[in-house]
Image (tube, grey):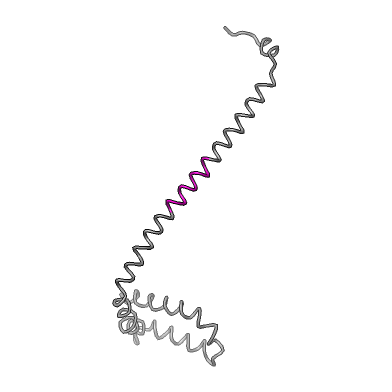
Amino acid sequence: VRWMMYWIVFAIFMATETFTDIFISWFPFYYEIKMAFVIWLLSPYTRGASLLYRRVVHPTLARREQEIDTYVAQARERSYEAMVRFGKRGLNIAATAAVQAAAKSQGALAGRLRSFSMQDLRSLPDEA
């Protein structure tokens, strides 16, 4: 549970840090403060990640639980519809390619058979 709390808080930190880094990286000792914060999160003595998770993250998630569940259900439905749509499109492309390949090979076979004259076919020995 402790590691789960750490990784959730760390992921939130990394997501926000990606955007805020652009604006506050000029701040003196910014990288040292950031490194100290990560050590504070990770340290078993300070339990910073557990503290932040219990005081900030968990209450926020609990308040928005219904919204999150609705969003996940909508994403599941949309992803299923997208997979069906892409699957149909892929099958259509494969079927078209198969028909075109069959048509090309049919034409090649007919051209090959046309190259034989009736005289050539009569000159073949009968096996019967």
Which part of the image, by quadrant, shows the N terminus? bottom left
Q: Residue 11 location in percent, x, y?
A: 42, 75
Q: Residue at x 34, y 74 (%)?
A: 4
Q: Is residue 121 above or below residue 16?
A: above
Horizontally, residue 41 falls left or right of residue 22, namely left
Q: As rendered, which of 78 and 13 lies closer to the eye?
A: 78
Q: How many marks?
A: 0
Q: Is residue 82 above or below residue 95?
A: below
Residue sticking out furthest to the bottom: 28
- Per the rendered image, the range of residues in magenta is 83-95
Q: Residue 122 location in percent, x, y?
A: 67, 10
Q: Residue 48 location in percent, x, y?
A: 36, 85
Residue sticking out furthest to the top: 128
Q: Residue at x 32, y 79 (%)?
A: 60
Q: Is residue 126 above or below residue 46?
A: above
Q: Quadrant of residue 80?
A: bottom left
Majority secondary structure of the magenta segment? helix
